[in-house]
């Protein structure tokens, strides 16, 4: 049975969480709670949980401080937050899970079921390392992205992603000096994650890294030539916006 702990500074939120576990998650074992970073670290070390629900903002620090001050990450992590902001974007980059507060029962059940299916803790450790790297980037320029394929996980430097191509419900990554990688998430999700960086949705099926754009060619239909010599179509409705970006750079 999966052992769960909760680290959350709000007493009402802790009570609500326990009520939800009682009503919707009877096949887990709740083994403790803590209200701040210091007690959270102690709780994890003493109880050795399989899954930690972790608040982001607490009086004596953040949930990231909890993770940074543990000698190893041998448990799953699900963040809980009331705000959609930069920290959650960093969490998405590292492919860790999170839910927004107030917690929806269905989302809680789904998050726990997902954690049960991902019991390989060394993968969680790699994801946490990526998260901490991005959180510690003082300029808030998220530089690493965790990608999961059928073989495991790969940590990719965002600057090395040349372009992405939709392939049904999958996304094909073209990565500098690494080749291609097929990931079981749709292109729209990565467009949302990478929207504030140097990426542009040039076509329904293509997202390009503008740093790799070599030229725009209107012969035989509009297309873009990238520095790896690949050719990517440019949708008519996207042409004006792209040309505006090029001319302003």
Image: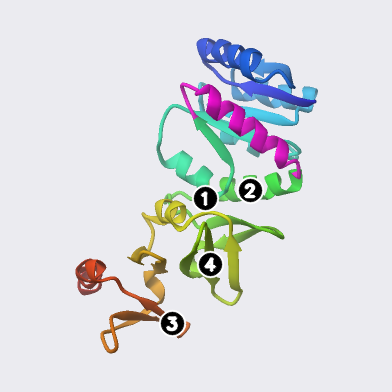
> Which sits earlier in the primary sequence, circle 2 or circle 3?
2
1 vs 4, front mark:
4
Q: Can residue 193 be seen in the rendering of this structure?
A: yes
Seen in the picture, residue 41 relative to 197 is either above or below; the reply is above
The answer to whether the residues at label 3 and label 4 have Cβ atoms under 8 Å apart is: no
Residue that mark 1 sits on: 93
Q: CA distance from mark 1 to mark 3?
A: 25 Å
Residue receiving disc 3? 227
Residue 38 lies left or right of residue 88; in this view the side is right
Q: Quadrant of the N terminus?
A: top right
Residue at 71% across, 40% down: 117
Question: Which mark identifies residue 127?
Answer: 2
Query: Which of pointers 3 and 4 indicates the residue nearer the eye?
Result: 4
Residue drawn 42% across and 56% down? 194
Q: Is residue 102 magenta?
A: yes
Q: Nearer the viewer, residue 116 or 135?
A: 116
Residue 229: horizontal and vertical position, in percent? Answer: 45, 85
């Amino acid at each position: 049975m999966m052992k769960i702990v909760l680290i959350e500074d709000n007493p009402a939120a802790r009570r609500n969480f326990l009520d939800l576990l009682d009503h919707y998650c009877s096949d887990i074992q709740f083994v403790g709670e803590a209200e701040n970073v210091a007690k959270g670290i102690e709780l994890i070390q003493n109880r050795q949980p399989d899954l930690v629900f972790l608040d982001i903002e607490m009086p004596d620090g953040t949930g990231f401080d909890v993770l940074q001050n543990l000698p190893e990450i041998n448990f799953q992590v699900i963040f809980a937050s009331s705000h959609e902001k930069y920290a959650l974007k960093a969490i998405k980059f590292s492919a860790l899970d999170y839910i927004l507060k107030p917690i929806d029962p269905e989302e809680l059940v789904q998050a726990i079921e997902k954690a049960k299916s991902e019991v390989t803790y060394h993968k969680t450790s790699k994801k946490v390392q990526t998260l901490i790297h991005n959180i510690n980037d003082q300029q808030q320029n998220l530089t690493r992205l965790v990608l999961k394929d059928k073989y495991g996980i790969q940590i990719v430097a965002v600057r090395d992603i040349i372009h992405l191509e939709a392939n049904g419900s999958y996304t094909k990554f073209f990565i500098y000096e690494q080749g291609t990688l097929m990931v079981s998430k749709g292109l729209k999700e990565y467009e949302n994650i990478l929207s504030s960086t140097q990426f542009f949705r040039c076509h329904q099926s293509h997202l390009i890294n503008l740093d790799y754009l070599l030229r725009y060619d209107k012969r035989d239909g509009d297309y873009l030539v990238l520095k790896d010599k690949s050719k990517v179509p440019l949708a008519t409705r996207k042409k004006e916006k792209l040309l505006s970006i090029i001319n302003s750079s």
